[in-house]
Amino acid sequence: MRNWMSMAMGTVSNSTLFLSFASPIHKTIIPFSLTKTSPYLISRRTFSVSSLPSLSADSNFNFSHSGDGNGVAVSTRSSKVLLKGMTYPELEKWVQSHGYRPGQAMMLWKRMYGNDIWAHQIDELEGLNKDFKKMLSEKADFKALAVKDIHTASDGTRKILFTLDDGMVIETVIIPCDRGRTTVCVSSQVGCAMNCQFCYTGRMGLKRHLTAAEIVEQTVFARRLFTSEVGSITNVVFMGMGEPLQNIDNVIKAADIMVDEQGLHFSPRKVTVSTSGLVPQLKRFLHESNCALAVSLNATTDEVRNWIMPINRKYKLDLLLETLREELCLKHNYKVLFEYVMLEGINDRLGNLLSLYFLHLIYSFAFFPFVTFVMCCQRKYYLLFENCIFFHTKRRKMECSEHDHMHNTYDDLVH
């Protein structure tokens, strides 16, 4: 198996599954909305208890370095403004402050993000006023990242290593799909403070937050470098390095730039922000952003989740799920994606599966559209979950091997 990340984000395609739970009192039939998707940015290797680092019960979390998405970003290399760190209203205001018309701001915006230009330098700004271009060359920077290396897997997945202004390195993954969609998976931090036991980034600790410009430019580079090869890049997932909601200001700002209709024009439902469960930031995200939310669940009890995801010690599972139910009552036709990484001998037993469905029974009702996917690292465990989950949706033999890609086998099951 490959030792670096190679997975894909799927588009939503619902299939109804009816779960039947027998009890001494009655039998309950619950409609279950299953969203077709695939895991991504998870190393394709087998996890076991012995492979996970130890974690003391009193582990602390560093929630410092809170990102601030307000104001205009400035390059660390100079006093120049980073253009990709501004929303369109901010850019328009900045352009006007230098004596130019709002129309010039819109022309600049479209050349940075639209019209298949994705400009990275002054020479690519055709059609703009000569004096305006001169001002930009003196006052502004286009690039916050530099490509260090690109790795390509046999299935066409690309991993880009970017060097930041301060010399630190982040990763971005481009995931093509033969079903007409391509996903870019972006990082939101250098390192991560969450220390999830199955995540190698967590072992780095948190180095710093990425700016909005550094986040946005990952998607711009993706389109600029690979659109001609893989087609239109339609989806964005914040599932690279870092906990996005710990850097919530810059993440919300970057997502707003990505979905701007005059710019990159991603659909809000195709921009997905993942979190390990930071409850206050999660509530703020649901209030301020129309983009999709994914929650990394990975366990059905506090005992297990406390260990594999230490953030659960601060925000317990019942608090996380109850908060989601309360917040989703206020949003129309909004679904949350739950991620579940199967760890051998930890959360991959049949009892864990049943507990997952009992959580659905407890928290879903009419207000909590519980949407989930299940991923595993070994074929035998995937078949176990296939028999329990997918048997009711479509009785079709799954042909797979240990080296099959999960997004292909999952698509085969639900079609």
Image (spheres, helix red, strand yellow):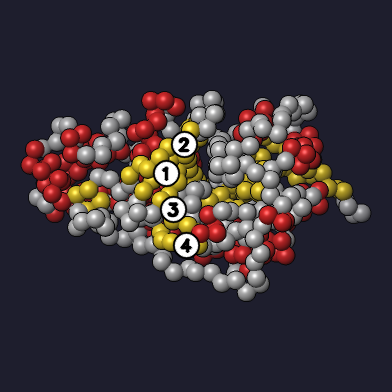
Amino acid tagged 3: Ser
CB within 8 Å, label 1 to label 2: yes
Q: Nearer the viewer, residue 348 or 100?
A: 348
Separation of marks 2 and 4 at Cα, in angstroms? 25 Å
Whether residue 349 can be seen here: yes
Mark 4 or mark 3, earlier in chain: 3
Q: Residue 206 bears which disc, if any?
A: 4
Mark 2 falls on what kind of element?
A: strand
Mark 1 falls on what kind of element?
A: strand
Separation of marks 4 and 3 at Cα, in angstroms? 11 Å
Mark 3 falls on what kind of element?
A: loop
Residue occupying image coordinates x 44% and y 69%: 64
Residue occupying image coordinates x 40% and y 31%: 226
Separation of marks 2 and 3 at Cα, in angstroms? 20 Å
Mark 4 falls on what kind of element?
A: strand
* Residue 184, position as x, y percentages in the image: 46, 39
Q: Residue 151 bears which disc, if any?
A: 2
Q: Residue 161 bears which disc, if any?
A: 1
Amino acid tagged 2: His
Q: Quadrant of the N terminus?
A: top right
Q: Quadrant of residue 307?
A: bottom right
**Callout in the foreground (4, 3):** 4
